[in-house]
Amino acid sequence: MHFSDADGRVLHAPIESAIDDIVVRLDSAGFITYASANACELGIDLDALLLMPHISDFADPDYTAQIVHGVAGVLAGEDAIARVEFPLREQGDAGLETGAQSPRLRRWYSISLRVIDDDDGSPQGALGLMRSVKHMQPLGAAAPVDPHTGLPNRPIFCATLARAIAASEQQCVAIFAVDRMRAIFMQYGQSTADEIRWGFAQFLETMTRPEQEVGHLDDERFGVTLPGMSMRAAREWSADVIQTFADLTDSGSSRSQELTASAGLAQVENTVDWTLRQAELGLVMARAGGGMQVGQCKPVASHASTLASGDAVERAMEAAILRATQRHH
């Protein structure tokens, strides 16, 4: 399965290999025409139905309108990607009925939708990726996931690193980024950039194991925890990810530039900020070398000197405030 833009660049997304994800295809009205085998997790045997249900039939009635709006927006070309989180409609003895459980106990899912065009560019339906949302937040709470990629956001990812540091766990972290994303945005626009970012997020998730966590750090950077890996093993794994991505996105067309990615590595130690800074420096080194590389920056300062520098900054700020107060009086 792959996606391609109007300029011929192909971005493969092997999303059906994810264990718990549910792939659905919708027609132009939002009715399901195909669902992957693990759709049984929704509690309905789709093979036993004479008529396939509308995608909104799986959601709590309070969220039906959001899903319908998301599908309509994608098919109308208003949104390149639509993502909606919703609690499943609870099943009763008489079919699909709303349950009376607490929102925290409901099963939450997210669905990411994108349009499927024919050869003329006319929308024929939408492709959806349904994913269980494990945080089970109460209604109205801010979602700890990035709305475009469905990955845990930076605070959630940093919390994972903080727990590893507190437990003195030996592991590495990798920061990945698609090369030349700014140039891609300037040449092809935001929709193409969003599509590439979405596809790269799905790709990273298919390349990771269950014990590894993928997070969306900022507009173009993704973090991956690598528990139990030595730095050498982490470098080999990251290099394989980068090469696989380049192979999958190679359209074979001379008029389209190959999509590549780079990575920076660091040991998870000292503090979260220190760890991410080291990995970010490694990414900078990889990109400075031309991209499609794995970089590692050797620490130039100890954690103690980093803390000392922070203390010096605080003392300087206190002295400046004291001088300003004295001048005012």
Image (tube, rainbow, N blue to C red):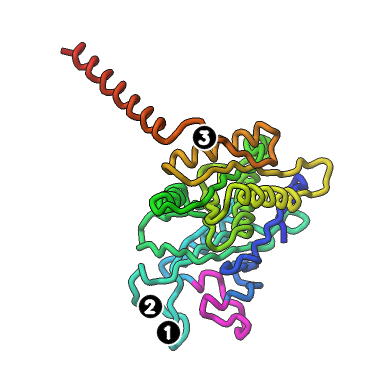
Q: Nearer the viewer, residue 128 or 266?
A: 266
Instruction: Please name the amino acid that badge 3 sits on.
Output: Pro
Q: Look at discs 3 and 2 and give the one toward the viewer.
A: 3
In the image, is residue 188 above or below residue 215?
above
List the residue tagged with mark 3: 299
Q: Tell me the crowding category of disc 2: few under 14, some 14 to 19, or many 20 or more residues within 10 angstroms, Cα based.
A: some
Residue 163 is labelled as none
Left of 203 or right of it: where is 222?
Answer: left
Residue 7 in percent (x, y) is at: 76, 45
Q: In the image, is residue 55 part of the stretch drawn in magenta? A: yes
Instruction: Please name the amino acid that badge 2 sits on.
Output: Gly
* Upstream in sequence: badge 2 or badge 1: 1
Residue 310 in percent (x, y) is at: 36, 30
Q: Nearer the viewer, residue 200 or 30?
A: 200
Q: Nearer the viewer, residue 227 or 257?
A: 227
* Range of magenta residues: 40-58
Left of 233 or right of it: where is 137?
Answer: left
Determine the CA span between mark 3 and mark 2.
54 Å
Residue at 65% x, 45% y: name it.
Answer: 192
In the image, is residue 196 above or below residue 106?
above
Residue 246 in percent (x, y) is at: 73, 48
List the residue tagged with mark 1: 92
Under circle 1, the secondary element is strand
List the residue tagged with mark 2: 99
Q: Do the residues labelled 2 and 1 touch (CB within 8 Å)?
A: yes
Under circle 3, the secondary element is loop
The reply to whether residue 150 is visible in this rendering is no
In the image, is residue 167 above or below residue 221?
below
Residue at 55% x, 51% y: name it.
Answer: 224
Determine the CA span between mark 1 and mark 3.
58 Å
